[in-house]
Amino acid sequence: MNDQPIEDTRGDLLLSTDRSRIDIDAVLAMLSGSHWAASMPRPRLERAIENSVCFGVYDSSGRQLGFARAVTDLTTYAYLTDVIVAESARGRGIGSWMVETVLVHPDLQGLRRIALWTRNARALYERFGFAPAEIPTSTYLEMRPGPATMAARG
């Protein structure tokens, strides 16, 4: 993964992929209001950030206004997740800017697929070409491993 930060500005806002800028507490506060990560503990978020391509948006004082991350192998697949904007900053195009930047990020070019789940932002993602998956010959499967499951797998 190229850890050379990519940065862009729009007015008084900065979008950066520099993980050292991420305000973990601010991101946790934003995620605590979400339906998908409301109870994420800090150590789990820290580890997720270390192992993802991350995008943050900051105001001129450095306050974190937005966050997104791509979980990826950098070659074939990326899962876009934790796309969130602080309630006080919504309606300013920050979410769109982050998605736009994810899609042009140099480390995420040439992938076969970028996937995501959304409950209430479908229109945002459709503007960028995301569409419901059409996999007629496959079945989506998932596992939510817990301590007992992992121990049983040995």
Image: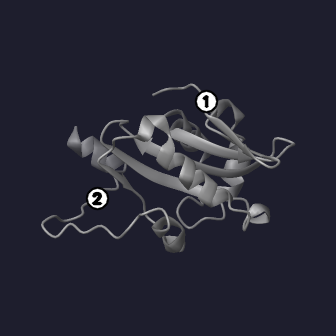
What percent of the width, then of the height, locates residue 145? 33, 51
Q: Residues within 10 Å of mark 1 (few under 14, many from 20)?
A: few
Q: Residues within 10 Å of mark 2 (few under 14, many from 20)?
A: few
From this viewpoint, which residue is outermost toward the left? 137
The residue pinned by badge 1 equals: 5
Q: Which numbered circle lies on residue 91?
A: none
Residue 16 visible in the current orientation: yes
Dot 1: element: loop
Task: Tell me what residue is drawn at x 46 percent, y 69 percent.
Answer: 126
What percent of the width, then of the height, locates residue 41? 59, 48
Task: Tell me what residue is drawn at x 61 percent, y 33 percent.
Answer: 6
Dot 2: element: loop
Give the amino acid type for the residue marked by disc 2 in the picture: Glu
Q: Quadrant of the N terminus?
A: top left
What percent of the width, then of the height, locates residue 127? 50, 67
Residue 40 visible in the current orientation: no
> Earlier along the polypeptide chain: callout 2 or callout 1?
1
Residue 134 appears left or right of 98: left
The residue pinned by badge 2 equals: 142
Q: Quadrant of the C terminus?
A: top left
In front of the other: 7 or 21: 7
Q: Quadrant of residue 85?
A: bottom right
Query: In the image, is residue 152 above or below residue 30?
Result: above
What percent of the width, then of the height, locates residue 137? 12, 66
Query: In the image, is residue 89 above or below residue 150?
Result: below
